[in-house]
């Protein structure tokens, strides 16, 4: 009897594997459609386009997906200088008494903010989540109100939080779409901290805790974000995927088991990632202070009129001939009635309002040279989101004021914020991430004014050529930092 050649044996193995995956995925889809708790969505993270949706706006229990917002609030506190990674967070009796999953830290002990974040991302520790809530909000109830307020500002209009850990509570509800928005916001607003979600193992004391997200390291392109489960919610998962110039955020809520939830997620990734955009000139922006949908760059999702345009992440360097497109305007949020200009300090004061939680101060600059140059310039006319028409030529408007040290030649831009102080802090933070690349580079901010709104661009100067500027951007993007190479 003849034996199969090695070539045909490999072909049969591959065919059998493909058939197994297909059967498993098909079963997952059948189960999902028959499961009354199930809802899901897949969003193209470059364009904001919805690639797949099933009951994406139906209210669901978030379970431990709640900790995505808890971590967002921690990242915000780190960014604003309210805490550092070394800040000690006390475990209260209330926190210590939370039910598992938890680290089991005795009441009265403390944990560093860095370890707290790691425990939330991997072990999904309920005791730590409560301790974080009490530290940042003064009380768990107040922190839940802060979380809900931040959710509304991100466009998560159907989400309400009652606690920081996600254990089932009356009125604590969300939707698959809202969780996708939060997933994008975590990636876009805090790329410097997003790596926490890809942590495979967390070591604390003598214990080692594996990440509950079993797709990490097993499904190509998956780099986070979070799992969740309670009896009321079912098995939940939010996944971020970046592969071959395509990027999506996918959500599965209400799986019957961890295995079926993972199988459904694998199927969604396999089917819809190839349909995501590969266009590099589109830039996704998730607004920190927006009220309706968080994603920009698709006609269905818009930024608000009021509120700062946030720090953004660019996919590629943009040539200077490309028009600068600013976000379109929309109606202001109700809490800023009468069309009053956005006041970030006032918002922070409201968000952090509690007896023990001070209003965060601006992040201090690093030991490097301060940002002294300020340029105020006219804004080019914007192009409607999703439009393919070329932007009209910018009128010849003389800048309102230009410092004597206005740079020329190649520069890189690492973001744009609502205040000069925030831009300075951003420059210091980015320089600290790449001291070899940026240690000897100059810095400046450029204020772009249109009406009563001002955007402060954060820029590094001193690049001798286009290649040097683009290489710097390549280095920064590898560290998940926004970067545009421009010829000043």
Image: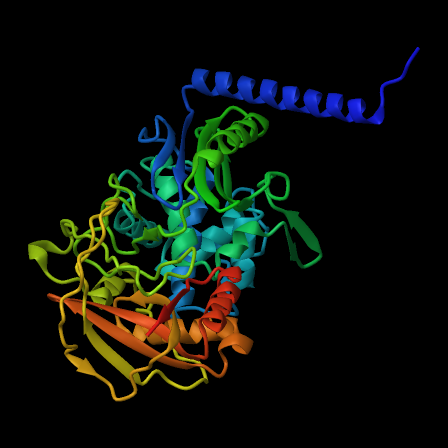
Residue 62 image offset from top left, x and y in percent? 41, 37
Q: Nearer the viewer, residue 471 or 424?
A: 471
Q: Is residue 134 visible?
A: no
Check the picture and name the quadrant holding the C terminus: bottom left
Colour logic = rainbow
Q: Nearer the viewer, residue 179 or 159?
A: 179
Q: Nearer the viewer, residue 28 or 447?
A: 447
Q: Is 436 above or below relative to 325?
A: below
Check the picture and name the quadrant holding the N terminus: top right
In this view, the residue farthest toward the bottom is 404
Q: Is 345 above or below relative to 375?
A: above
Q: Is residue 343 visible?
A: yes
Residue drawn at x 38%, y 57% is: 189
Residue 426 image offset from top left, x and y in percent? 38, 71
- Among the 4 quarters of the image, the one containing residue 442: bottom left
Q: Is 2 above or below relative to 443?
A: above
Residue drawn at x 57%, y 48% is: 122
Residue 223 image offset from top left, x and y in percent? 54, 47
């Amino acid at each position: 009897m003849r034996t199969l050649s090695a070539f045909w044996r490999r072909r049969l193995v591959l065919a059998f594997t493909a058939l197994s995956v297909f059967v498993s995925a098909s079963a997952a889809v059948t189960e999902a459609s028959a499961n009354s708790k199930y809802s899901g969505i897949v969003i193209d993270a470059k364009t904001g386009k919805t690639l797949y949706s099933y009951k994406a706006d139906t209210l669901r229990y978030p379970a431990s997906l709640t900790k995505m917002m808890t971590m967002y609030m921690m990242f915000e506190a780190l960014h604003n200088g309210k805490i550092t990674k070394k800040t000690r967070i006390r475990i209260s009796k209330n926190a210590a008494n939370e039910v598992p999953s938890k680290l089991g830290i005795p009441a009265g002990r403390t944990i560093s903010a860095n370890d707290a974040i790691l425990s939330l991302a991997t072990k999904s520790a309920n005791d730590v989540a409560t301790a974080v809530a009490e530290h940042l909000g003064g009380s768990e109830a107040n922190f839940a109100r802060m979380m809900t307020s931040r959710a509304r500002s991100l466009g998560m209009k159907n989400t309400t939080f009652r606690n920081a850990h996600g254990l089932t509570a009356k009125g604590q509800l969300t939707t698959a779409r809202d969780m996708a928005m939060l997933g994008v916001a975590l990636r876009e607003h805090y790329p410097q901290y997003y790596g926490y979600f890809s942590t495979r193992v967390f070591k604390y004391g003598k214990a080692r805790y594996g990440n509950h997200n079993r797709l990490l390291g097993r499904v190509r392109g998956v780099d986070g974000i979070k799992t969740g489960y309670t009896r009321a919610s079912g098995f939940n998962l939010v996944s971020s995927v970046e592969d071959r110039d395509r990027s999506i955020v996918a959500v599965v809520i209400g799986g019957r088991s961890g295995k079926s939830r993972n199988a459904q997620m694998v199927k969604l990734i396999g089917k819809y990632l190839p349909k995501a955009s590969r266009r590099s000139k589109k830039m996704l922006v998730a607004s920190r202070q927006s009220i309706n949908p968080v994603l920009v760059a698709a006609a269905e999702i818009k930024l608000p009129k009021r509120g700062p345009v946030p720090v953004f992440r660019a996919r590629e360097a943009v040539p200077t001939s490309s028009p600068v497109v600013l976000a379109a305007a929309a109606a202001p949020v109700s809490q800023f009635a009468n069309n009053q200009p956005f006041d970030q300090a006032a918002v922070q004061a409201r968000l952090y309002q509690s007896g023990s939680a001070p209003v965060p101060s601006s992040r201090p600059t690093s030991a490097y040279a301060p940002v002294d140059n300020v340029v105020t310039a006219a804004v080019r006319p914007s192009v409607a989101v999703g439009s393919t028409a070329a932007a009209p030529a910018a009128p010849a408007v003389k800048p309102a004021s230009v410092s004597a040290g206005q740079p020329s030649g190649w520069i890189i831009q690492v973001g744009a914020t609502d205040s000069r102080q925030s831009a300075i802090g951003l420059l210091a933070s980015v320089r600290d991430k790449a001291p070899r690349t940026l240690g000897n580079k100059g810095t400046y901010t450029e204020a772009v004014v249109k009406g009563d709104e001002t955007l402060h661009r954060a820029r590094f100067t001193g690049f001798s050529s286009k290649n040097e500027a683009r290489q710097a951007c390549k280095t920064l993007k590898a560290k998940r930092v926004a970067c545009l190479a421009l010829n000043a």
